[in-house]
Amino acid sequence: MSMNPSSSSPVTSANSHLQLNKLLIPRSQRRLFFLQFTFMTVLGWVVGGIASIALEKIIWESLPPTFIEEPQIWVFWARLLSNIVFAVVFAADQALVVRRYFSGWLWLFATSFGWLIANGVATAWINYISSIATSLNESLTSEITLTLGFLSTLSYIFSGIWLGLFQWLVLRRYTTKSWWWNFSPSISFLLISLFVWLLSLGQNLLPQMYRTPVLYWSQQVFTAMILGVIPAIGLCTLKRNFRRKTETSS
């Protein structure tokens, strides 16, 4: 007995439509979302970096001589304010893209706060490891140097968990089985560390007069791109939380 194709096609079409609706980013919008999110992340990295550097410079130039007598305190506050400006600009650029799929304001706050915590934790650990290297003075062998450098890199990579945690607190409201997002920024930081390491291996191939600017801009551009590409891919794989959508509608 032959099967009637007209009777099975509506069921197949409905199942296919349901599978597509499960995605946080619909398949038809993935390519555009990927390009926009990556571009806005790079833009936020550049604009946020310029704004933070300009703010720190303005603060130092506007301080009276009496305040400069205690540089450690003002270095801390100047860097904190510049980091806040960078984090807000960086997160706001991403929020402009993701707000079509979930709360852009929540993403702005979560990414800003998570970035500040991750940056603070990484800086604290790296400074602590550097203080150990300084205390050893001339007894620093190549093996110890390699070990301390490895520990500094690990502290930088695992600090990304803080950023992932705060972003996950937002995503869990709109998606299902998104626990792995906690480690997504750490994957980005790992790839950035690998790229920086590869740059250091090939720096001798560059002319001396162009080495510093080429290394700096290459690191900045690829860092921004990695910070855009990895989460964009991750967001495209997440599935919607239909239970929350139903509760909101009711």
Image (cartoon, helix red, strand yellow):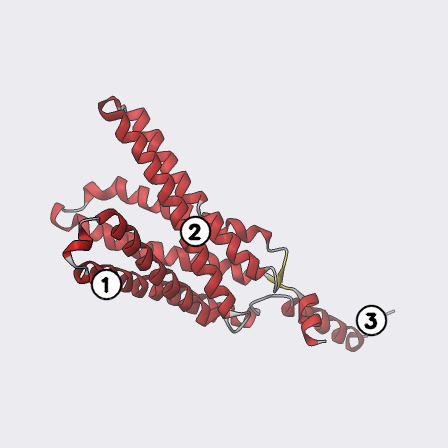
User: How far apart are labels 1 and 2 at the CA level?
Assistant: 22 Å
- Which numbered disc, 3 or 1, marks the residue closer to the eye? 1
Q: Which residue is mark 3?
A: 3
Disc number for residue 54: 1
Q: Quadrant of the N terminus?
A: bottom right
Disc 3, SS: loop
Q: Which residue is mark 2?
A: 117
* Mark 2 neighbour density, 10 Å: few (under 14) some (14–19) many (20 or more): some
Give residue 229's position: percent from left, percent from top.
Answer: 43, 59
Where is 16 relative to 117, above or below?
A: below
Q: Which mark is first along the chain, 2 or 1?
A: 1
> The residue under label 2 is which amino acid type?
Ile
Q: Is residue 56 left or right of residue 109?
A: left
**Residue farthest toward the bottom in the current orientation of the protein:** 6
Where is 124 relative to 14, above or below?
A: above
**Residue farthest toward the left in the current orientation of the protein:** 209
User: How far apart are labels 2 and 3 at the CA level?
Assistant: 61 Å
Q: What residue lies at 45% left-to-right and 43% top-to-bottom? A: 158
